Protein backbone atom coordinates (compact mmCIF):
# COMPACT_ATOMS: atom_id res chain seq x y z
CA UNK A 1 0.00 0.00 0.00
CA UNK A 2 1.56 3.30 -1.10
CA UNK A 3 0.92 6.28 1.15
CA UNK A 4 -0.32 9.32 -0.74
CA UNK A 5 2.07 12.28 -0.70
CA UNK A 6 1.06 15.86 -1.41
CA UNK A 7 3.95 18.33 -1.60
CA UNK A 8 3.82 22.08 -2.10
CA UNK A 9 6.60 23.69 -4.11
CA UNK A 10 6.58 27.38 -3.21
CA UNK A 11 9.22 28.18 -5.85
CA UNK A 12 10.69 31.69 -5.41
CA UNK A 13 7.64 33.03 -3.59
CA UNK A 14 7.16 34.12 0.04
CA UNK A 15 9.59 36.12 2.12
CA UNK A 16 10.19 35.00 5.70
CA UNK A 17 7.21 36.83 7.19
CA UNK A 18 4.87 35.51 4.49
CA UNK A 19 6.28 31.99 4.80
CA UNK A 20 5.63 31.95 8.55
CA UNK A 21 2.10 33.18 7.94
CA UNK A 22 1.37 30.56 5.28
CA UNK A 23 2.88 27.66 7.21
CA UNK A 24 1.05 28.71 10.39
CA UNK A 25 -2.21 28.86 8.45
CA UNK A 26 -1.64 25.43 6.92
CA UNK A 27 -0.75 23.96 10.28
CA UNK A 28 -3.94 25.39 11.76
CA UNK A 29 -6.22 24.24 8.94
CA UNK A 30 -4.67 20.82 8.43
CA UNK A 31 -4.81 20.17 12.18
CA UNK A 32 -8.61 20.19 11.84
CA UNK A 33 -8.49 17.42 9.25
CA UNK A 34 -7.72 13.79 9.61
CA UNK A 35 -4.94 13.58 7.07
CA UNK A 36 -3.09 10.68 8.63
CA UNK A 37 -3.48 8.75 5.37
CA UNK A 38 -1.56 11.44 3.48
CA UNK A 39 2.02 12.70 3.82
CA UNK A 40 1.96 16.49 3.50
CA UNK A 41 5.17 18.37 2.73
CA UNK A 42 5.87 22.04 2.06
CA UNK A 43 8.97 23.33 0.28
CA UNK A 44 9.62 27.05 0.95
CA UNK A 45 12.63 28.99 -0.37
CA UNK A 46 15.96 28.36 1.42
CA UNK A 47 15.79 31.64 3.34
CA UNK A 48 12.59 30.64 5.13
CA UNK A 49 13.41 26.99 5.93
CA UNK A 50 14.54 27.42 9.54
CA UNK A 51 11.64 29.66 10.50
CA UNK A 52 9.10 27.37 8.82
CA UNK A 53 10.72 24.38 10.56
CA UNK A 54 9.98 26.07 13.88
CA UNK A 55 6.37 26.65 12.89
CA UNK A 56 5.98 23.01 11.83
CA UNK A 57 7.48 21.70 15.04
CA UNK A 58 5.03 19.20 16.58
CA UNK A 59 2.92 19.07 13.44
CA UNK A 60 2.70 16.23 10.93
CA UNK A 61 3.62 18.48 8.02
CA UNK A 62 7.02 17.68 6.51
CA UNK A 63 9.54 20.27 5.36
CA UNK A 64 11.46 20.12 2.10
CA UNK A 65 13.93 22.23 0.11
CA UNK A 66 13.63 22.91 -3.61
CA UNK A 67 17.19 21.94 -4.57
CA UNK A 68 20.59 21.11 -3.10
CA UNK A 69 24.20 20.55 -4.10
CA UNK A 70 25.87 17.14 -3.92
CA UNK A 71 29.00 18.12 -1.98
CA UNK A 72 28.77 18.48 1.79
CA UNK A 73 30.77 21.71 1.91
CA UNK A 74 33.42 23.62 -0.04
CA UNK A 75 34.07 26.54 -2.33
CA UNK A 76 30.75 26.31 -4.20
CA UNK A 77 29.41 29.84 -4.00
CA UNK A 78 25.66 30.05 -3.84
CA UNK A 79 25.06 26.37 -3.19
CA UNK A 80 23.43 24.65 -0.21
CA UNK A 81 24.29 21.11 0.89
CA UNK A 82 22.30 18.20 2.28
CA UNK A 83 23.76 18.54 5.82
CA UNK A 84 22.79 22.24 5.77
CA UNK A 85 19.23 21.32 4.78
CA UNK A 86 19.07 18.72 7.53
CA UNK A 87 20.28 21.26 10.05
CA UNK A 88 17.58 23.69 8.88
CA UNK A 89 14.97 21.02 9.62
CA UNK A 90 14.32 19.47 6.20
CA UNK A 91 13.28 15.87 5.71
CA UNK A 92 12.72 16.18 1.96
CA UNK A 93 14.32 17.79 -1.06
CA UNK A 94 13.04 18.32 -4.60
CA UNK A 95 15.65 17.33 -7.16
CA UNK A 96 15.66 17.94 -10.92
CA UNK A 97 12.61 20.19 -11.10
CA UNK A 98 11.98 21.12 -14.73
CA UNK A 99 12.62 24.79 -13.95
CA UNK A 100 16.10 23.82 -12.79
CA UNK A 101 16.61 21.67 -15.89
CA UNK A 102 15.29 24.48 -18.11
CA UNK A 103 16.91 27.58 -16.58
CA UNK A 104 19.88 26.38 -14.50
CA UNK A 105 21.52 23.64 -16.55
CA UNK A 106 20.36 20.71 -14.43
CA UNK A 107 21.01 17.40 -16.22
CA UNK A 108 20.30 13.76 -15.45
CA UNK A 109 23.91 13.50 -14.34
CA UNK A 110 23.65 16.29 -11.77
CA UNK A 111 20.26 14.98 -10.66
CA UNK A 112 21.88 11.59 -10.07
CA UNK A 113 24.69 13.11 -7.98
CA UNK A 114 22.23 15.15 -5.91
CA UNK A 115 19.99 12.11 -5.46
CA UNK A 116 22.88 10.02 -4.10
CA UNK A 117 23.94 12.81 -1.73
CA UNK A 118 20.37 13.35 -0.49
CA UNK A 119 19.89 9.63 0.18
CA UNK A 120 23.30 9.44 1.82
CA UNK A 121 22.19 12.08 4.29
CA UNK A 122 18.78 10.60 5.00
CA UNK A 123 16.74 13.18 3.09
CA UNK A 124 13.75 11.92 1.11
CA UNK A 125 14.30 13.03 -2.47
CA UNK A 126 11.43 13.99 -4.75
CA UNK A 127 12.92 13.44 -8.20
CA UNK A 128 11.18 15.20 -11.08
CA UNK A 129 10.90 13.83 -14.60
CA UNK A 130 8.77 14.96 -17.53
CA UNK A 131 8.57 15.87 -21.18
CA UNK A 132 8.09 19.31 -22.69
CA UNK A 133 5.38 20.23 -25.19
CA UNK A 134 7.61 19.77 -28.24
CA UNK A 135 8.58 16.31 -27.06
CA UNK A 136 4.97 15.33 -26.36
CA UNK A 137 3.84 16.57 -29.76
CA UNK A 138 6.65 14.62 -31.42
CA UNK A 139 5.42 11.47 -29.60
CA UNK A 140 8.63 11.34 -27.61
CA UNK A 141 7.08 11.32 -24.13
CA UNK A 142 8.06 7.74 -23.26
CA UNK A 143 11.53 8.19 -24.74
CA UNK A 144 12.16 11.28 -22.58
CA UNK A 145 10.75 9.62 -19.48
CA UNK A 146 12.91 6.54 -20.04
CA UNK A 147 15.99 8.75 -20.39
CA UNK A 148 15.16 10.75 -17.25
CA UNK A 149 14.37 7.68 -15.18
CA UNK A 150 17.27 5.49 -16.30
CA UNK A 151 19.92 8.17 -16.05
CA UNK A 152 18.68 10.08 -13.01
CA UNK A 153 18.38 6.83 -11.07
CA UNK A 154 21.65 5.34 -12.32
CA UNK A 155 23.26 3.05 -9.70
CA UNK A 156 20.58 3.76 -7.11
CA UNK A 157 19.97 0.57 -5.15
CA UNK A 158 16.50 -0.91 -4.74
CA UNK A 159 16.71 -0.14 -1.04
CA UNK A 160 17.42 3.53 -1.76
CA UNK A 161 14.79 3.77 -4.46
CA UNK A 162 12.19 2.66 -1.94
CA UNK A 163 13.05 5.84 0.00
CA UNK A 164 12.67 8.01 -3.10
CA UNK A 165 9.58 9.74 -4.45
CA UNK A 166 9.24 10.29 -8.19
CA UNK A 167 7.28 13.24 -9.53
CA UNK A 168 5.98 13.03 -13.09
CA UNK A 169 5.69 16.65 -14.16
CA UNK A 170 4.88 17.25 -17.81
CA UNK A 171 6.62 20.57 -18.47
CA UNK A 172 3.73 21.77 -20.64
CA UNK A 173 1.43 21.57 -17.63
CA UNK A 174 3.61 23.42 -15.12
CA UNK A 175 2.38 26.89 -14.28
CA UNK A 176 0.37 26.97 -17.50
CA UNK A 177 -3.06 26.12 -16.14
CA UNK A 178 -3.05 23.18 -18.59
CA UNK A 179 -3.41 19.97 -16.62
CA UNK A 180 -2.84 16.48 -17.93
CA UNK A 181 -6.09 14.55 -17.86
CA UNK A 182 -6.35 11.67 -15.43
CA UNK A 183 -5.83 9.29 -18.37
CA UNK A 184 -2.72 11.12 -19.60
CA UNK A 185 -1.21 11.09 -16.12
CA UNK A 186 -2.09 7.44 -15.52
CA UNK A 187 -0.57 6.41 -18.85
CA UNK A 188 2.82 7.89 -17.97
CA UNK A 189 2.72 6.83 -14.31
CA UNK A 190 2.07 3.25 -15.43
CA UNK A 191 4.89 3.53 -17.94
CA UNK A 192 7.26 4.67 -15.16
CA UNK A 193 6.13 1.86 -12.87
CA UNK A 194 6.61 -0.73 -15.61
CA UNK A 195 10.06 0.67 -16.31
CA UNK A 196 10.95 0.33 -12.62
CA UNK A 197 9.68 -3.26 -12.79
CA UNK A 198 12.18 -3.95 -15.58
CA UNK A 199 15.11 -2.10 -13.97
CA UNK A 200 14.40 -3.32 -10.41
CA UNK A 201 11.63 -5.76 -9.53
CA UNK A 202 7.94 -6.03 -8.68
CA UNK A 203 8.44 -5.01 -5.04
CA UNK A 204 10.19 -1.78 -5.99
CA UNK A 205 7.79 -0.98 -8.82
CA UNK A 206 4.74 -1.58 -6.65
CA UNK A 207 6.12 0.36 -3.67
CA UNK A 208 7.66 3.52 -5.13
CA UNK A 209 5.40 6.55 -4.90
CA UNK A 210 4.85 8.52 -8.09
CA UNK A 211 3.33 11.98 -7.75
CA UNK A 212 1.77 13.98 -10.55
CA UNK A 213 2.65 17.65 -10.92
CA UNK A 214 1.38 20.31 -13.32
CA UNK A 215 -1.36 22.82 -12.53
CA UNK A 216 -2.91 20.69 -9.80
CA UNK A 217 -5.84 22.55 -8.23
CA UNK A 218 -8.74 21.73 -5.90
CA UNK A 219 -10.85 21.27 -9.07
CA UNK A 220 -8.74 18.53 -10.64
CA UNK A 221 -7.01 16.70 -7.77
CA UNK A 222 -9.83 14.16 -7.32
CA UNK A 223 -9.71 13.05 -10.96
CA UNK A 224 -5.93 12.71 -10.92
CA UNK A 225 -5.56 11.02 -7.57
CA UNK A 226 -8.28 8.49 -8.39
CA UNK A 227 -5.97 6.88 -10.94
CA UNK A 228 -4.35 3.68 -9.69
CA UNK A 229 -0.74 4.70 -10.32
CA UNK A 230 -1.04 8.32 -9.14
CA UNK A 231 0.15 8.41 -5.53
CA UNK A 232 0.02 12.10 -4.85
CA UNK A 233 0.75 15.52 -6.24
CA UNK A 234 3.53 18.07 -6.43
CA UNK A 235 1.72 21.37 -6.33
CA UNK A 236 3.15 24.74 -7.35
CA UNK A 237 0.81 27.72 -7.64
CA UNK A 238 -2.04 26.23 -5.63
CA UNK A 239 0.28 25.52 -2.69
CA UNK A 240 0.75 29.25 -2.10
CA UNK A 241 -2.69 29.73 -0.57
CA UNK A 242 -3.93 28.17 2.64
CA UNK A 243 -7.35 27.49 1.21
CA UNK A 244 -6.38 25.82 -2.07
CA UNK A 245 -3.62 23.65 -0.59
CA UNK A 246 -5.88 22.56 2.29
CA UNK A 247 -8.61 21.68 -0.20
CA UNK A 248 -6.15 19.62 -2.27
CA UNK A 249 -5.03 17.68 0.82
CA UNK A 250 -8.66 17.20 1.91
CA UNK A 251 -9.81 15.93 -1.47
CA UNK A 252 -6.81 13.67 -1.90
CA UNK A 253 -7.39 12.06 1.48
CA UNK A 254 -11.08 11.56 0.71
CA UNK A 255 -10.34 9.79 -2.57
CA UNK A 256 -7.55 7.63 -1.13
CA UNK A 257 -9.48 6.61 2.03
C1 LIG B 1 5.62 22.69 -9.76
O1 LIG B 1 6.16 23.74 -9.43
O2 LIG B 1 6.19 21.60 -9.54
C2 LIG B 1 4.29 22.74 -10.38
C3 LIG B 1 3.72 21.63 -10.74
O3 LIG B 1 3.74 24.00 -10.54
P1 LIG B 1 2.19 24.33 -10.87
O4 LIG B 1 1.35 23.48 -9.94
O5 LIG B 1 2.05 25.77 -10.62
O6 LIG B 1 1.96 23.93 -12.30
Image (spheres, helix red, strand yellow):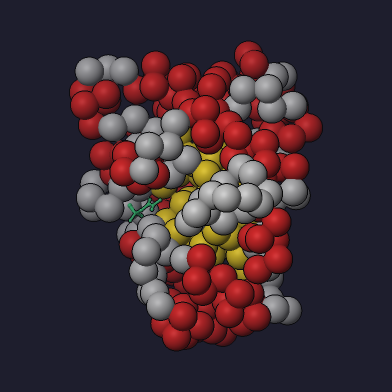
Pick the residue in front: 132 or 37: 132
Q: Taking 207 as reference, is 224 above or below it?
A: below
**Which residue extends farthest front?**
75
Q: Give residue 175's position: percent from left, percent from top.
A: 27, 53
Q: Is residue 131 visible?
A: yes
Q: Is residue 225 left or right of residue 126?
A: left
Q: Is residue 243 visible?
A: no
Q: Give residue 124's position: percent from left, percent from top.
A: 67, 49
Q: Taking 157 as reference, is 56 above or below it?
A: below
Q: Taking 105 as reference, is 7 above or below it?
A: below
The residue drawn where x is 52% and y is 78% is 23
The residue drawn where x is 21% and y is 26% is 134
Q: How many marks overall? A: 0
**Which residue extends farthest top?**
198
Pick the residue in front: 219 or 12: 12
Pick the residue in front: 204 or 223: 204
Q: Give residue 169's position: percent from left, percent from top.
A: 40, 40
Q: Quadrant of residue 35?
A: bottom right
Amino acid sequence: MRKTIIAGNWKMYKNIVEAIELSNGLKRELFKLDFAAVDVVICPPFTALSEVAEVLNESDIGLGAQDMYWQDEGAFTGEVSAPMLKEAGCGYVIIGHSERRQFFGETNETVNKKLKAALGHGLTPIVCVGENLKEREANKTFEVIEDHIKNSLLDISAEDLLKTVIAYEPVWAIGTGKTATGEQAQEVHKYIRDLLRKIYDDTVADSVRIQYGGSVKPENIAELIAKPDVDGALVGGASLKIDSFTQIVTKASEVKK
